[in-house]
Image (spheres, rainbow, N blue to C red):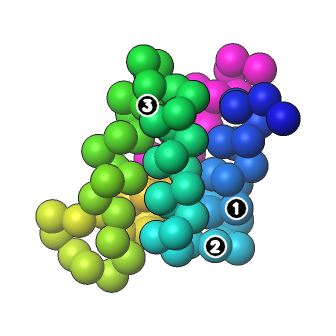
Amino acid sequence: MKPQESLLELIDRFLEGYDRSMQLVNEIEGVLVADFLDTEVFESLAEAVSLYRPGAGAPYVDEEEMAEEFISARRLLASDL
C-alpha cells in the first residue's frame, strides 16, 4: 500500500468515528514522520497531532478540532493520488 493510501485509511478511521484514540493519532503521526516529513501534509498536521488530547481542553486539540484538521489534510492527500 502506498503511503498516501495508508495515511488516508488511518484518517478515515478517525473521521468515521471507528477510532478516535490517542493511539490512532500517534500511529498517524508516525506515518507522517516516516513518509511525509517535508510535505505540506506534514506541515498542516504536525502541531495538531502533537497536541491531540480528547477532552483535555485548551491548549490541546480535541476530537472535533482534530477532525477538521484531518479533513483539510485529506483533501491534500486525495489531490495527490
Which residues are the magenta region? 69-81
Work out how far the residue at label 1 is from the one at label 3, CA to CA, in angstroms. Answer: 19 Å
Residue 24 seen anywhere in this rendered image of the structure: yes
Above or below 60: residue 74: above
Q: Position of residue 67 (x, y in %)?
A: 50, 57
Residue 58 in picture, x, y percent from top left: 16, 69
Q: What is the chief secondary structure element of the magenta stretch?
A: helix
Give SS at disc 3.
helix
Residue 55, percent from left and from top: 33, 82
Amino acid type, callout 2? Asp
In the figure, 57 relative to 71: above or below?
Answer: below
Give me the residue at 46% from left, 35% from top. 33
* Horizontal relation, residue 36 to residue 49: left or right: right
**Label 3 CA crowd tier, 10 Å (few <14, some 14–19, many 20+):** some
Q: Name the residue under label 3.
A: 42
Badge 2 vs badge 1, beta-carbon distance below 8 Å = yes
Single out the residue that lies furthest toward the right: 1
Name the residue nearer the viewer: 29 or 66.
29
Q: Quadrant of the C terminus?
A: top right
Disc 2 crowd, CA 10 A, few/some/many (<14, 14-19, 20+): some
Disc 2 and disc 1: Cα gap in Å?
6 Å
